[in-house]
Image (tube, rainbow, N blue to C red):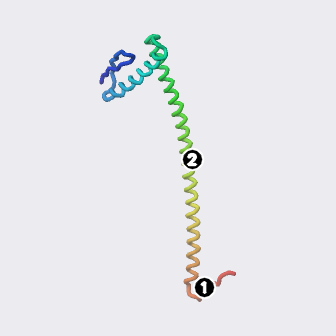
Amino acid sequence: MAQVTVTIDGKAYRMACEEGQEGHLTELATQFDQYVNHLKGQFGEIGDLRITVMAGIMVMDELADVKRRLTGMEAELSTLRQGRDTALDNALAREERLTGAIAELTERLNGISRKLTAPASQRVPAET
């Protein structure tokens, strides 16, 4: 298990993390320290514990907002996928109808071609 020292509000904290996660943990601590410093700038020295709790609540508020947005985007993605699937089904149905119409037309043209190329004695008079 790796260890890294992070600094929050001017105080060093030694923390354990998985191998390879040192940079990520350091970045998270830096971001959290920015919250703490922001609150200290707004409220002054109101106590380390209170500032830390307030910063934690700010982070959780942002996380909740991100979760709400993610849920909305997942719902939108689901709607888009359903629309895509419906459009694909409709396109396949149109393609099948078109294929059938082309096959029918091809058969009719072949019939006309057979009549035109048949010897004169075998031709059926055209209907009027």
At label 1, the amino acid type is Arg
Quadrant of the image containing the C terminus: bottom right
Rendering coords of residue 17 (x, y %): 34, 24
Q: Quadrant of residue 68?
A: top right
Q: Quadrant of residue 26?
A: top left
Q: Residue at x 30, y 22 (%)?
A: 3
Quick one: label 1 or label 2, which is nearer the N terminus? 2
| Residue wearing tag 2 | 83
Question: In what element is the residue under mark 1?
Answer: loop
Rendering coords of residue 33 (x, y %): 41, 20
Q: Residue at x 55, y 60 (%)?
A: 95
Q: Is residue 108 above or below residue 23?
A: below
Q: Residue at x 49, y 20 (%)?
A: 57
Is residue 79 toward the left or the right of residue 54 in the image?
right
Question: In what element is the residue under mark 2?
Answer: helix
Rendering coords of residue 116 (x, y %): 57, 82
| Residue wearing tag 1 | 123
Mark 1 vs mark 2, CA separation in Å: 53 Å
Residue toward you, 52 or 10? 10
Quadrant of the image containing the N terminus: top left
